[in-house]
Amino acid sequence: MSGHPGAALVVNQLMAEVAALLGRGKLHKRYRQHVAAVALDLFSAWSDDPTLYVAYPRGRDYYGVGERMALLHFDRDILTTVVDSMATLGYAEKHGGYYNHVTSRGKQARMRAMDRLAALMLSAKVAAGDIVRQHDELYLRAEKDAKGKKVALAVPKTRRTAMMQRNVRVINDLLRKTSVRLDLDDEEMAELVTALGHCPDFRCDTVYRVFNNGVMDRGGRFYGHWAQGIPCRYRAHLLINGEPATEYDFSGLHCRLLYAQAGAIPPAGDMYSLPNLSMDDNKAVRDVLKTLWLAAINAETDDAAIRATQRGVRQEFGVTVSQGELQVWLAGLRERHAPIAGFLGSGAGLRLQYADSLLAEGILLNLAAQDIPAIPVHDSFIVPLSKGPELVAAMNRAWTARYGIAIGIDAKYPVPTN
């Protein structure tokens, strides 16, 4: 969406041209949302890279009750008519989607802006920075169906969800005013794009919460900000309002939450270490062990946890680990954490995510009240380097208010020396 007056003029002109092409004197008001969404999405992509495509679904199944497109109030017939009309008018190039039932692979329909649309936007003095992404504050997904798909559901309207929405708006009001960028040279940026498979969309500068299994107490974590999607080694190069960033996380958060639920005492030392490995070896593979532990809590089988770990460490840390090694390490984690071993492969992760999302909400609101922008990355938080002490204080306050005991808080990259 865009509040720029030039964008409104462009949409008015496109509405008139599409109406004339369709032989209508005036289009229904619902067309305006669709014309604006297509034009602004295409121009945003063109501003990043004139060859970049925007994918969109044309199949009717994507617009049924509970589907994402329906919840966003998109009508399949209106959207496809708008795209087809803009292609005919020379504003867009379009390609149909396909699905290969033999390989189970395919592509959605895609479109990209032609120079004519870009020229129209530029003549109206619309810039990419004038366009922002519009999304809800809360999303709710059903449990996976037989095809492994999670249908989107309407968020129930209650006092509790209304409060959650207001809190997300408070957090986003500050994030929208915050400059977050990467201090990378061209070669390093190219490496990041290769690692991700795409360029980060820097217009994704706000967050939303996602709940799962059709209830509002499963999941609930914050998603949406572009900085959340880059590997940790690149997050160390973030600048927030021109200042280097720092990131802190709770030490062994989910592990300690499970021990609290089991009424057991956690072992001393690092939650993600193994007794049969040396200190140096544990340090070398700690990130992999942590990823494996968290995957095992969320997955329903060991095989699923191992596959998820392999994907995660390859993307996050750029390393490859064999299934055999991971199976041995998973057995070691089970042995070390025998009191809570039953939670591994149980899918308990969504309950734990809800617990850590409540902590995150409190921490983000605490910092926002101090005018300190923070980007949540599940159980860690990114703030300007000078605000590290305030972040640690907010994290300690949120944890002790709920659980009344101390917990370790670790810096993931440089912290202030004073």
Image: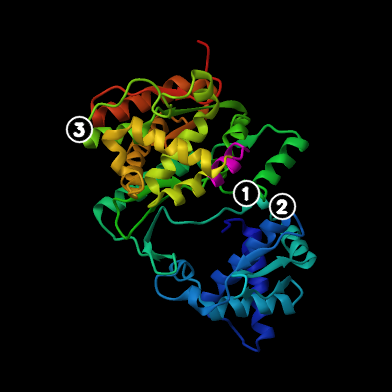
* Residue at the image position 44 percent from the left and 64 percent from the top: 148
Q: Which residue is mark 3?
A: 263
Q: Which residue is mark 2?
A: 48
Closer to the camera, 212 or 342?
342
Rendered location of residue 274, percent (x, y): 43, 27
Residue 201, label in figure: 1
Q: Secondary structure at mark 2?
A: helix
Amino acid type for the residue under numbered disc 2? Asp
Q: Is residue 248 left or right of residue 319?
A: left
Amino acid type for the residue under numbered disc 1? Asp
Q: Secondary structure at mark 1?
A: loop
Mark 2 closeness class: few <14, some 14–19, many ≥20 residues within 10 Å? few
Position of the N terminus, as image quadrant, is bottom right
Q: Locate residue 171: give its quadrant.
A: top left
Q: Is residue 24 left or right of residue 325?
A: right
Q: Secondary structure at mark 3?
A: loop
Residue 197 to residue 262: above or below: below
270 part of magenta stretch: no
